[in-house]
Structures are given as C-alpha cells and as structure tokens.
Image (cartoon, rainbow, N blue to C red):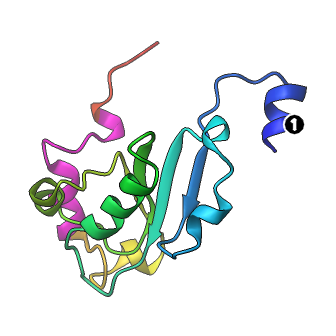
Amino acid sequence: MFDRLVNHHKLNNLIWVWTSDASDTAADWYPGDAYVDVIGMDIYPGENQHGSQYVNFDRIKTLFEGRKILTLSECGAIPTVASMFEYGDIWSWVMPWNGDYTRNDKHNGVSFLNVFLKSDKVITRDRMPDLK
C-alpha cells in the first residue's frame, strides 16, 4: 500500500498510522520508522474503566524511544482527561470503537463523553482553526 500510494501515485501528504495491541510480539510487526508517522494502540479495558493507560503508553513510548506521536487509535472506554494528565499518558488522540462503546453507559456514556469533549484540554473538530 505504501509503495503504491507514495511511489506510484506520488502522494506526499499522507499520515501513516501503525496500530498494534499491547502484546509482547507487537514490535515484530512494526514496518519501520520510514513508513510510520504515528504509533497507535488498541486497548479495550473493562466496562467503565476510564483509568489511565499509562502502563501501555509508557511501554510503547519506551519501545519506540519517543520517536513517534502516540495515539489511542482504537479503544473501548476512554481514559479520563484527569487521569491522562495525572500519569502523563497524554495520547495525541483517542478513537473509541462505535456501537456499544459510544451508545450506552457501559463504556463511554453521554455524560462521560460530554465531560471529556468539553474539557479545555481536548481539542475537537469544532475548535480547530479554519486553515483555508
């Protein structure tokens, strides 16, 4: 895919995200720094487990020596903003899985999402400057 898009189609404005889980062999699948801009993690804690994911964050930060932006690219429950700032696992972005993970109170209920998205430490699309 990289070769086709970059070399054949000459696209040079793509952001490449490599996503893995927290397994011990995850790094074995890493394609290399030349092909990756952002490193993501898929983490699915239990229902309403909004605590910090600092163990996983620190693990990939250490594994890749802080060379890349880190994201919680797929998750169940989103960590609270307070827990991310308390423990230092400040993901560049979070993306909860859809369906049950965003439509009921088991993982990220409406009240939780309202608090999270209204935090002054969270930038949502409507807060982005017009770059046109």
Q: Secondary structure at mark 1?
A: helix
Classed neighbour count for the residue bearing mark 1: other residues with Cα under 10 Å, few (<14), some (14–19), many (≥20): few
Q: Estimate the x, y position of residue 50 in percent, counting from the top left.
A: 22, 74
Q: Is residue 18 left or right of residue 68?
A: right
Tell me which amino acid carries mark 1. Arg
Q: Residue at x 18, y 64 (%)?
A: 80
Q: Residue at x 67, y 62 (%)?
A: 29
Give the magenta-colored segment's residue range: 111-126
Q: Is residue 39 left or right of residue 105?
A: right
Q: How many marks?
A: 1
- Pick the front one: 86 or 14: 86
**Looking at the figure, which quarter contains the N terminus?**
top right
Query: As displayed, is residue 53 above or below residue 92?
Result: below
Indicate yes or no whether the magenta region holds residue 115.
yes
Indicate yes or no whether the magenta region holds residue 75.
no
- Pick the front one: 110 or 63: 63
Q: Is residue 69 left or right of residue 46?
A: right
Q: Estimate the x, y position of residue 125 in percent, counting from the top left.
A: 36, 38
| Magenta stretch, main secondary structure class | helix
Query: As displayed, is residue 132 above or below residue 2?
Result: above
The residue wearing badge 1 is 4
- Pick the front one: 79 or 32: 32
Q: Estimate the x, y position of residue 118 in percent, counting from the top left.
A: 16, 49
